[in-house]
Amino acid sequence: MLTTKARMLFNHLFSLQLFIIGALGTYGSWLTNATEMLFPIFLGFFLWVLLIFVGYKTQQATSHSRFYWFGLLQLIVCWTIFPLFKSIRYGLYQWSFDNILYNLDKFLWFGKSLPEWAISLQSGWLSEFLSFCYFSFYFLIIGSALFFFFSRNNILTKNYFFGLMLMYFWGFIGYFAIPAAGPYSAFPSDFNYPVYSGAMTLFLTDLVDKGITGMDVFPSLHTGITLYIVGFFLFFRLSKNSVLFVSYLNRTYFGNCLFALPLRH
């Protein structure tokens, strides 16, 4: 069981990490003249200041608030500044780990990466179904976050948001340490993308293309956070399916999913 001081220390470190991401993203946007990043820069800074204020008020409070605003604000700030990773990647990085991850995948899967093995399984209905499952990841986070936000169990809510933010904290460190774009983006000649021309698949493809940053696939937070949330509710019984979704859709490497597994603990 974590002490209150340990939680406070983590929250301070995570707030600092978010500030660094925002600052580097702003600098990268200036270097690349990415004016489209002005909105996440200014909104992210405003929300970060609000987060610090709410965190300070929460620490000084003598009684528990009905809602855990601090945890919800942490999640909102994460999502708001996430696009700035694109400016960081293209403004400050001159290298990528895609080749290393691709070759590691081939080693783990007997000469072919897991996305390459999945090519033989591609079909219209399966592409639509797995695209829907991939897209439902966002609703899984939003739904569970709101569920605990409105929950009357303050301790359970704090535990949920602490674990979720811990996933993002280590995930963001992985993004900085091992920047990679993913199979279909780094090796377009090896992977057909989108895998099918169905409505859901094309919708997801357009959504991912707009949100891809070039450094957000290691570790696979899609896998790790799905494991964490499903495990929080169902003791890890259903979480293995997320590995199939992200590999089939050529979105990440198996090694990234493998690395995400211990993060859920």
Image (spheres, grey):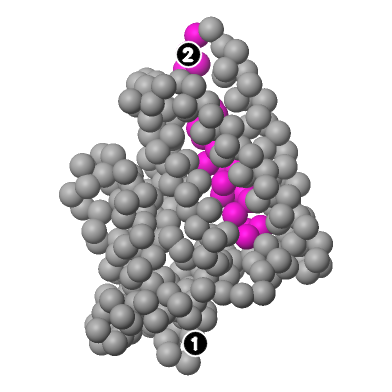
Front residue of 209 and 231: 231
Q: In front here: 132 or 186?
A: 186
Count neighbours of disc 2 (C-alpha within 10 A) and say few if under 14, some if 14 to 19, many if 20 or more: few
Q: State the quadrant of the N terminus.
A: top left
For the residues labelled 2 and 1, the Cα–Cα distance comes to 52 Å
Left or right of residue 258: residue 162: right
Q: Where is residue 117 in the image (x, y as percent from the top left)?
A: 27, 83
Residue ranking furthest to the left: 237
Q: What secondary structure is found at the residue carrying circle 1? A: loop
Relative height, residue 64 to residue 137 (above, below): above
Between disc 2 and disc 1, whose residue precedes?
2
Span of residues in magenta:
63-85
Is residue 126 in sight in this rendering? yes
Name the chief secondary structure element in magenta: helix
User: Quick one: quadrant of the C terminus?
Assistant: top left
**Residue type highlighted by circle 2:** His
**Circle 2 sits on which residue?**
64
